[in-house]
Each structure stands twice: as structure tokens, then as C-alpha cells.
């Protein structure tokens, strides 16, 4: 029995997730990214408390007011408080990131697992379809999808989800391919494990590390893509305080009231930077070659 | 006595010197680069309906009669004078002699007849290349009310109408009815829209589609040759990008100025502002096909809910006036007796409650996707309207489409509520009231038989006083029915470099540029 206890201890110390977490906390980049994201999430959750004004309250006779103690970041083209709008906008950006990447994750992983595990004709069919999707510039594909579905935020999220599917499918498929023939899979099969058990118990966990990195980085690009679509008028519709839409409306006053464009722009940079830093940190932390460094 | 003489002399000298410098300064030559929001659609004026096309075709073609610059008064152009018969059905035009088309063919009565026959007769071999929209618009279909066009002699042409049309002369002065060279239309056929040949002050040099149209002065123009040697119309869709080009000097003038930039132009030493006489309306329409807009109380409530003056102060740099009628006060027959629905949210709420909507309702509000002279910032004004309506408890969802889809869908009455506008073509009330609100034409399913009768009667009445009376009555009917919230009549600003002289904007939205000159 002492042997088993020993084994348990060893397991605890070498739990790869715990190990990765420890390494993440050691990396400055990762911590900075994590900090920004936690900050963003807090801002989004506490928006009603933090925002000094109603983000939709217009005062068209007080347009383009420069930053002041009343409006810390000034007012926009409709006389709305920019700070309050950016605060509420963080909800939209986080929602876009999670929903669209969540969509891509579910479909991408499913396609990748099916293609990698079953191979043959199914693999061929799925992966060629993914190749076709990857052949389009992603933003163009997203514009096409939104143009068909109609310009709305939920359609933009769907479009961004769709264009991200192939990346997840590829990652999962390649990691499935690399281990599907390994001995422990054969052993599991010999012990009578079914496809379902093998896929979810053995194959998927092995793909987790690259998936987590890809998810984090994809959230960053999803936020950027949503902002781009909204900038083009294809995403969030007025009066939504989506950051890209705010930027687009500020264009006409770039010379006269530069703050109207500057602050939403900074907000986008900040949000995207947070997820990118965390993604880089995670990549280092989850890299098996970095073990025990 | 001597003192007076001296003073008179000095005054005279000053006046003379002003006159002399004024004349001396008019310089021949130079290129004018005109920045605008979109490219020309086509250069066959009868086939197009948009201002960006007319802006160019007006330089290439002349019409039988023309508007005096800056007004909608009719003056001679290709026709030197005209008579109308007692009954008002036969119009005789005496044409200018010695005028040549750009291709060297002579302009005469035959050419006029050939053009009108091409436009009005559907079995004419050259009734091709488009839908001849403006012809059917103004003359009621094909062949429409122009029954016959007869060549009396080489320079006399006669029109026989099937019924009286009071604004006939004003209609003929419209840009779409520019006279084209019959030989050129025959030569190019379907491609004529790329190879325009008229009698105008400028000749097409090159059209790079999507980018620019280049015109050269017509050395053989029947009026005085243009001062400019060349005009370049450049398309720069984004208002602020276009304004930056003007500031940096790569274009000489632009229309579609954002109201935000007006102040900067006024303060600038190198730029100046020109204001187009107001002859337009920007409106917010409610579609009778969609509940609850079939209820006049709801429509009136909306009229009470929107603060037009605040919108003008915010989004027009004050260059507009609140509208109470569908047609602007610059047009004769404007009914100033009408008491506007004043801005009063409380009253609006009462009306909604009366109609059974005290808890409000939700609907789609379509906002303009592109800047137009009457509504320069559709997205912002749409949001302002949305916000005003939310104050009376109704929820508007903002929706838009790209410009051609937007026009097409509103034309097919698919929009529950929408923003749109109109710039007058010919200065006649018919061109607003009949075209926009008659039951045969309205885009919002407003179908009033009462209004239709008045408008049709006004078309057939030649007596001016009687027409004024009828149009006054029409505006009263429209006011009571409240099919729209008339928003504004704007004065569209145009920005020019200070060196661009003698530019006189027309109320119709486009003008001839042959008298424009550059002072440097």
C-alpha cells in the first residue's frame, strides 16, 4: 500500500497542469496578459457600477466635448460619454471573443477528431473543405458571410466563429494523427475501449495544450475581427458601444476631435494585447520541451 | 458744386477700377479638379437618375431651354424662343442656328425630333441602353403626353401634347433632356453611355471608371468658350478623406462637405465656402403597410417627438431649416400657413396612448448608408431620431443596407420606417408633391385619393394662381395625414479653393461650369 501512496505523491508533484500554471506565473509576459484579462473581465462585470454615465444617453448639443472632469475621455459624435461607452463596450468584446471562439472550438475540435481518428474518405472530405475555407482571406470570408446573413453583431460573431473553425480542426487532427498509432492506444483498444472512450480519454487530452494556446490567441484575433467588421458597418449596429463601431463613427472627426477615435482604439489594443500576451505565456508554459526549466 | 463733382469722380473711378480688375482678372486656362462622393453611372443623360452623372453630362450636353444660373427660371439655350398655342397643347420652338455637335454634325430640328423620338417611342430602333427613366417620370410613360414631334423647318420644331402640362418648359430644362448627336448614338448603340456627344462647353476626354472623368473645353462652343481648359471629376467616397485632399491641394473643390468641417473652411485663408440655394427635403417616412403606422395618431405622435431644430444645430452646422411641408419654401406655392407639429414629447405620448400604444412598440428604422445633401450624416441623425423616439416609449432598431439595395427596397415599400430625401429637379411643386407623395409614386404606401385628385388637377391647370391654390391645398392634406416627419430643408455647403472664381451653385444640385475660372 505504501507504494500506491508514493505514486499518488508523485502524481501530484508532476501534474502537468499544475506544472504549467506554475510556469505561467513565473513568466512576466503571461502574468501581464492574465492581469489585463482579469481587469477586463472585472470592468465588464462591474460596468453598471464603474460607468459614470449612461452609455446610450445622448446630448446632441454637447457633441465632441474634449476630455474634462465631467467626461473623463470626452464626448462622442452624439454627445455620449466615451468612458462609459468603452466600459460597456468591454462586455461586447469579451462576449464576441468567447462566443465566436467557443463556436469555432466546438466545431473545429469535432471535425479534427473525426478526420484524424477515422481517416480515409471522411478525413479527405473534412480537411479539403477546411483547406478551401483557409484559401479565402479570413476577413473577406467573414464579410461574405455577414453580407448574406445581414449586418448584425450576432451574425458577425457567427462569421468569425466559422472562419476560425479550420485552424482548430487542423491542430486537433495533427495531434490525433501523431498519437493514434502509439502503443498505449493499441493497449487501450486491446483492453476493449471503444472509439468514444479512446477519443475523449486519450486523444483529446493530448491535444489540450496547443488547443488552449490557440483558443487564447484566437480570442484576440476574434476581438480584432469583430472590431473590423463593426468598423465596416457589418457588425454591431448603432447605438451599440462596440469599440470598432465607435472607431468608425469617429473617423469623420479625426482632425477636429481626435480623442473620439483615440480611446476606443486604445481599448482595442489593450484587449487584444492582453489575450496575445496570455497566449504567448501559455505557449511557453505548456511547451513540453520547457519542462522543469 | 466742384466738391460734388470730385466726389462723383472718385466714386466713378473706384467703380471703374473694380470693373476693370474684375474683367481683367478673368483668366483663360487651367484645370479644375472637382472632388465628389461617387463616380458617374453613365454619360447618356436620359438613362441616369443620379447627381454624380448629371454633374458631368450637364457639361457635355445642352438642353432646349436652361435654368438661369442659381435659379430655376427658364431661359433660352438651344432654343432661342418659343410659343405655345391657346389650348396649351402645341409648343413651337425656334432653334439656334449654326450649332454643331462635338462630332461636327449640325444641330437642327431633325436632331431634336430624333432625340425625342428615341426617348418616347418604345419601338424606335435606338430606344436602347436603359430604361429612359426620367422621360417616363416627367412625361408620364411612353410615349407619354408628347404625342408628336414635328419638324416645321430646319430650325423650327413643334411638340403636340395629348394633355396640358403646366411645368412643360421647366421639365425640358432638366439635365436628362440634353440633346445628343443622333449620329453618335447610332454609331455606339448600347455603348453610347461611354461615348457621349453633345453640343456642350466640354468634350469627354477620358473616363476611368471608378476613378475620374476628364473633360476638355469645346473650342467650337456656341456660347463663349469655357474659361477652363480642363475639368477632372474625381471620386473620393469618404467625406473626410476628400476634405483632406482639398486641404492638401490635390483637388480644387468638393461637394459633400461634412458639417463638422464647415468651421475649418470658414476660418481657412485658402478655402472658401459656397452655399447651394436650398431646394430639397430630408424626411423620415412611415410605411402605411406596417402596423401601427396605418394609424394617423401614431404618425402625428412621431411628428411631435422629434426636435428638428436640435438636429439642425448638431448635424447641419445650422445650414438648414426645420421642415413642416414636404416641399421647400424656395418653391412657389409653399404653404406657410401650416402650423407645424411642435416638438412636444408629452403630447406625443398622449397621442400614442390614445392609439392604444401607451406601452410603446418596437420597429425597424432604416437609416441612410451614405451622405446625401439633405441628410449629410444618416447614421448620426438616425441615432438621434432613435433616441427621441425612445423618450416617448417606442423602440427603434437601426437597420441599413448598401445604397443601391436601400433605394431598391424602399422603392418596393419594404421599409417600415426610413430616412430619405429629395433634391428638386425643376423648381415646380409637382416635382416634389406628385413625385414623392402621390398614390402612384409614394414609397410608404400612402395612398390618398383626395390628394391624387388635387395633384392631377394641378398638373393640367395652366393658370398659375389656380395652381398655387391647389398646391396649398395639397400641402394641407399632407399635413393632416402626416405620412412623413418632414425633417429639414438643407443648404448644402460646397468647399472651394479661394482661387476658384464665379462658381454659381444651382438649386437643382448640379450646374454648368463653363463660366468658372481660376485666379492664379
Image: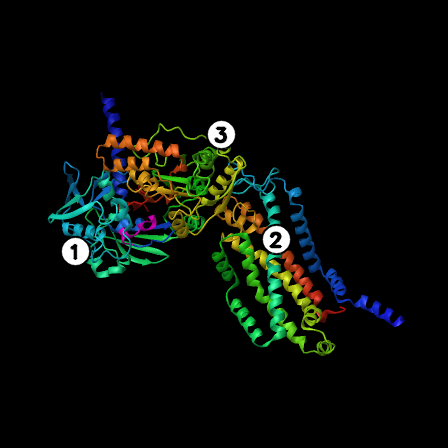
Query: Between marks 3 and 2, how big is the CA–CA gap?
Result: 40 Å
- The residue beneath circle 3 is B347
Q: Is residue B484 visible?
A: yes
- Which label lies toward us, 3 or 1? 3
Number of numbered tags placed on the structure image: 3
Kindly identify which chain the residue marked by label 2 belongs to.
A
- Element carrying mark 3: helix
Q: In this view, does A161 lie to the left or right of B304?
A: right
Q: Mark 1 highlights which residue?
A: B105
Whether the residues at callouts 3 and 1 have beta carbons within 8 Å, the answer is no
Q: Determine which quarter of the picture holds residue A100.
A: bottom right
| Figure check: B493 above or below A196 | above
Q: Name the residue under label 2.
A: A95
Which stretch did the figure color magenta? B43-53
Horizontal side of residue B457 vs B210, given as left or right: left
**Rendered image: mark on residue B11:** none
**Image x and y of residue B502, in percent:** 30, 42
**Residue B30 makes an appearance in the image:** no
In the picture, the quarter occupied by the C terminus of chain A is bottom right
Q: Position of residue A181 (x, y in %)?
A: 67, 78
Judge from the rendering whether residue B231 lies leftward or rightward of residue B361; answer left or right: left
Amino acid at each position: 500500500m505504501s507504494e500506491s501512496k508514493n505514486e499518488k505523491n508523485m502524481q501530484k508533484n508532476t501534474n502537468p497542469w499544475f506544472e504549467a500554471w506554475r510556469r505561467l506565473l513565473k513568466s512576466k509576459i503571461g502574468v501581464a496578459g492574465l492581469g489585463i484579462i482579469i481587469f477586463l473581465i472585472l470592468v465588464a462585470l462591474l460596468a453598471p457600477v464603474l460607468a459614470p454615465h449612461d452609455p446610450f444617453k445622448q446630448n446632441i448639443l454637447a457633441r465632441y466635448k474634449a476630455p474634462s472632469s465631467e467626461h473623463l475621455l470626452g464626448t462622442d459624435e452624439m454627445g455620449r460619454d466615451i468612458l462609459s461607452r468603452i466600459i460597456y463596450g468591454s462586455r461586447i468584446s469579451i462576449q464576441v471573443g468567447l462566443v465566436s471562439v467557443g463556436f469555432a472550438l466546438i466545431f473545429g475540435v469535432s471535425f479534427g477528431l473525426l478526420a484524424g481518428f477515422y481517416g480515409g474518405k471522411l478525413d479527405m472530405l473534412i480537411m479539403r473543405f477546411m483547406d478551401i475555407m483557409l484559401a479565402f482571406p479570413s476577413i473577406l470570408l467573414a464579410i461574405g458571410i455577414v453580407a448574406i446573413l445581414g449586418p448584425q453583431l450576432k451574425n458577425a460573431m457567427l462569421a468569425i466563429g466559422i472562419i476560425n473553425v479550420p485552424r482548430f480542426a487542423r491542430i486537433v487532427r495533427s495531434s490525433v494523427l501523431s498519437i493514434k498509432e502509439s502503443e498505449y492506444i493499441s493497449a487501450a483498444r486491446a483492453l476493449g475501449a471503444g472509439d468514444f472512450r479512446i477519443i475523449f480519454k486519450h486523444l483529446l487530452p493530448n491535444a489540450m495544450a496547443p488547443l488552449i494556446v490557440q483558443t487564447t490567441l484566437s480570442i484576440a484575433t476574434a476581438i480584432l475581427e469583430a472590431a473590423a467588421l463593426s468598423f465596416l458597418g457589418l457588425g454591431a449596429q448603432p447605438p451599440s458601444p462596440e469599440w470598432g463601431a465607435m472607431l468608425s463613427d469617429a473617423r469623420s472627426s479625426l482632425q477636429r476631435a481626435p480623442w473620439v477615435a483615440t480611446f476606443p482604439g486604445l481599448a482595442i489594443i489593450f484587449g487584444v494585447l492582453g489575450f496575445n500576451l496570455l497566449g504567448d505565456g501559455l505557449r511557453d508554459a505548456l511547451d513540453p520541451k520547457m519542462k522543469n526549466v | 458744386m466742384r466738391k460734388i463733382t470730385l466726389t462723383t469722380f472718385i466714386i466713378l473711378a473706384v467703380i471703374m477700377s473694380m470693373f476693370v480688375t474684375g474683367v481683367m482678372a478673368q483668366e483663360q486656362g487651367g484645370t479644375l479638379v472637382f472632388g465628389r462622393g461617387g463616380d458617374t453611372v453613365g454619360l447618356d443623360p436620359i438613362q441616369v437618375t443620379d447627381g454624380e452623372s448629371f454633374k458631368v453630362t450637364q457639361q457635355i450636353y445642352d438642353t432646349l431651354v436652361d435654368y438661369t444660373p442659381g435659379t430655376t427660371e427658364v431661359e433660352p439655350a438651344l432654343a432661342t424662343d418659343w410659343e405655345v398655342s391657346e389650348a396649351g397643347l402645341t409648343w413651337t420652338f425656334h432653334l439656334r442656328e449654326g450649332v454643331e455637335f462635338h462630332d461636327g454634325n449640325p444641330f437642327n430640328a431633325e436632331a431634336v425630333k430624333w432625340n425625342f423620338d428615341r426617348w418616347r417611342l418604345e419601338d424606335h430602333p435606338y430606344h436602347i441602353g436603359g430604361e429612359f427613366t426620367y422621360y417616363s417620370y416627367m412625361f408620364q410613360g411612353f410615349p407619354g403626353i408628347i404625342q408628336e414631334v414635328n419638324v416645321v423647318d430646319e430650325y423650327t420644331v413643334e411638340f403636340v401634347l395629348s394633355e396640358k402640362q403646366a411645368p412643360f418648359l421647366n421639365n425640358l430644362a432638366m439635365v436628362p433632356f440634353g440633346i445628343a448627336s443622333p449620329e453618335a448614338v447610332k454609331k455606339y448603340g448600347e455603348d453610347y453611355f461611354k461615348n457621349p456627344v453633345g453640343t456642350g462647353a466640354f468634350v469627354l476626354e477620358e473616363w476611368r471608371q471608378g476613378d475620374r472623368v476628364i473633360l476638355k473645353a469645346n473650342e467650337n462652343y456656341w456660347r463663349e468658350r469655357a474659361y477652363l481648359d480642363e475639368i477632372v471629376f474625381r471620386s473620393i467616397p469618404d467625406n473626410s478623406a476628400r476634405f483632406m485632399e482639398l486641404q492638401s491641394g490635390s483637388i480644387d473643390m468638393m461637394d459633400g462637405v461634412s458639417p463638422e468641417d464647415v468651421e475649418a473652411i470658414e476660418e481657412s485663408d485658402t478655402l472658401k465656402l459656397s452655399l447651394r440655394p436650398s431646394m430639397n427635403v430630408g424626411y423620415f417616412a412611415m410605411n402605411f403597410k406596417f402596423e401601427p403606422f396605418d394609424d394617423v395618431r401614431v404618425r402625428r405622435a412621431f411628428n411631435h417627438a422629434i426636435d428638428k431644430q436640435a438636429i439642425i444645430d448638431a448635424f447641419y452646422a445650422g445650414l438648414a431649416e426645420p421642415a413642416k411641408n414636404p416641399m421647400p419654401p424656395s418653391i412657389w406655392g409653399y404653404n406657410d400657413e401650416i402650423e407645424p407639429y411642435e416638438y412636444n414629447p408629452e403630447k406625443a405620448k398622449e397621442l400614442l396612448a390614445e392609439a392604444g400604444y401607451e406601452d410603446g412598440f418596437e420597429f425597424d428604422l432604416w437609416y441612410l448608408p451614405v451622405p446625401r445633401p439633405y441628410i449629410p450624416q444618416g447614421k448620426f441623425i438616425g441615432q438621434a431620431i432613435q433616441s427621441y423616439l425612445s423618450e416617448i416609449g417606442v423602440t427603434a432598431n437601426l437597420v441599413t443596407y448598401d445604397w443601391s439595395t436601400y433605394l431598391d427596397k424602399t422603392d418596393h415599400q419594404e421599409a417600415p420606417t426610413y430616412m430619405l430625401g429629395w433634391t428638386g429637379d425643376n423648381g415646380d411643386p409637382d416635382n416634389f408633391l406628385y413625385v414623392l407623395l402621390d398614390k402612384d409614386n409614394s414609397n410608404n404606401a400612402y395612398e390618398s385619393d383626395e390628394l391624387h385628385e388635387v395633384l392631377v388637377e394641378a398638373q393640367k391647370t395652366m393658370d398659375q394662381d389656380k395652381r398655387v391654390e391647389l398646391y396649398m391645398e395639397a400641402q394641407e392634406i399632407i399635413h393632416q395625414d402626416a405620412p412623413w416627419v418632414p425633417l429639414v430643408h438643407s443648404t448644402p455647403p460646397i468647399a472651394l479653393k479661394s482661387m476658384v472664381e464665379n462658381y454659381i451653385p444651382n438649386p437643382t444640385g448640379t450646374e454648368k461650369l463653363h463660366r468658372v475660372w481660376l485666379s492664379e
